[in-house]
Image (cartoon, rainbow, N blue to C red):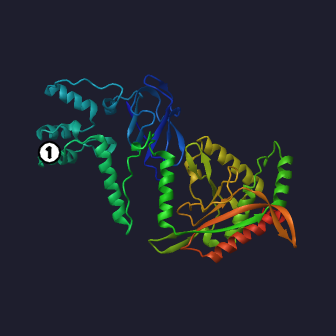
Amino acid sequence: MFDFKLPDIGEGIHEGEILKWHVEPGTEIKEDAPLVDIETDKASATIPSPKGGKVVSVLAKIGDIVPVGKVIAVIDDGTVEPSRAIKETPLEKPSIKTETPATKETSEQIFVPAAPATRRLARELSVDINSVKPTGPGGRVTPEDVKLYSESLKKPSVKPEPELHPEMTDKLATAEFAAHASCCIPLLDIEPLPDFSEWGPIEKEQLRSIRRKVAHKMLTSKILIPHVAHMDEADVTLLEEFRLREREHRKGKPGEHLTLLPFVIKAIIAGLKATPAFNSSLDPFKEEIIYKKYYNIGIAVDTPKGLIVPVIHNANEKSIIELADAVHDLSTRARDGRIEVKELKGGTFSITNIGPIGGTALVAAINYPEAAILGMGRVQEKPVVRDGQIVIRKMLPLSLSFDHRVADGADAARFVTEMIRELSDPNLLLLET
């Protein structure tokens, strides 16, 4: 039998939510065939089966959040040693039987990997080896595990707390969390939420996966980074004329999804080269500013499960057409839940664009640990003064949120001014390609 444990897929991920099983008990599965879909706080992924064989049981339901290393399926791959995870299956609970010493020994051999000497030690110490937490390789119980467990049995038992009504337990947990959070920050006083059901019907939804990660990231960003915002407008009249003309010519070809965003990315890179502080991160522990000599631009994408930020790596080495295709590809796969974890890492600067949805301006939260983020509003026709005359121009609202620890307002003004210069003249952007 083979115990399939939720694997460590890297990138600091410690748990995943079960989205879909591709098998059920009794299914024959081939090695590397899709086994289960999981969603982490960064992305969704399909995990293949590392073994071929017959699925004996699945130990996690759709919607369950399981930690890395937990057994979530058992596969009969033809090996001799039976799996001790079978007894954990929620599908079939074994009936309770009175065991004789002989049957108990058999039960231990089935469910717990341990050497004969370790089992003998357990019997001598009157320890149920099934209750011992294994620390040895391959999940084996060691003699040290048995001794440690035996010592724990000798300690005086703590009188259990009286059981509380679930509602009272929730209130106490909330109050305890609020008190803990309040004591960590001077003058911060977090009060538990009131019972909103007193005033009308409510509905609760568990904060999980991507939505929970967004909450953590935004709170971290707002607590650690002193945000400042600089706002201005870029005249993109000529650029929009050029973009629409080129997009019409490129139907069915690379660059057919030519939006304003690739041009903005090029302008951002020009601004970052002029003001490198916005392509940095601050290490508060070492009191160092880390300047990145590469340009990986993150683009915020609104997905059904929350906001995620896929990254265009080495954006400075791509043409505007290549950037247009990259933006379309990453955005599409992010919304479909097909983005890879590695495509969400390594960003140096981020963009969030509310223009397609609506809104004239925004002050975006910085994507920690980056130092700045650009917010784009909706392009609007506005009356402006040019050479003493009032004319109608297409204006793009820009808002730069930045870390005031690494840059000042003058730096932000220079950055945005360089961007406006690039966006106002398509020829300048073409020179960057």
| Residue 399 in picture, x, y percent from top left | 66, 64
The amino acid pointed to by label 1 is: Leu
The residue shown at (63%, 43%) is 333
Please give the name of the residue rendered at 87% of the width and 73% of the height, measured from the top-left corner: 388
Q: Residue 126 in the image: x percent, y percent?
A: 12, 38
Crowding at label 1, few (<14), some or many (≥20) Cα neighbours within 10 Å?
few
Q: Name the residue at 30% across, 30% down.
A: 87
Residue 292: percent from left, percent from top: 60, 68
Front residue (pair 295, 115): 295
Return the residue nearer the eye: 134 or 395.
Answer: 395
Q: Nearer the viewer, residue 261 or 114?
A: 261
User: Can residue 108 be seen?
Assistant: yes
Q: Which of the image's four quarters has the N terminus?
A: top left
Residue that carries the numbered disc 1 in the rendered image: 153
Residue sitting farthest toward the front = 199
Q: Position of residue 159 (x, y in %)?
A: 14, 46
Disc 1 secondary structure class: helix
For residue 334, what is the image quadrant?
top right
Horizontally, residue 244 falls left or right of residue 191, namely: right
Query: Measured along the vertical axis of the image, is residue 332 above or below residue 281?
Result: above
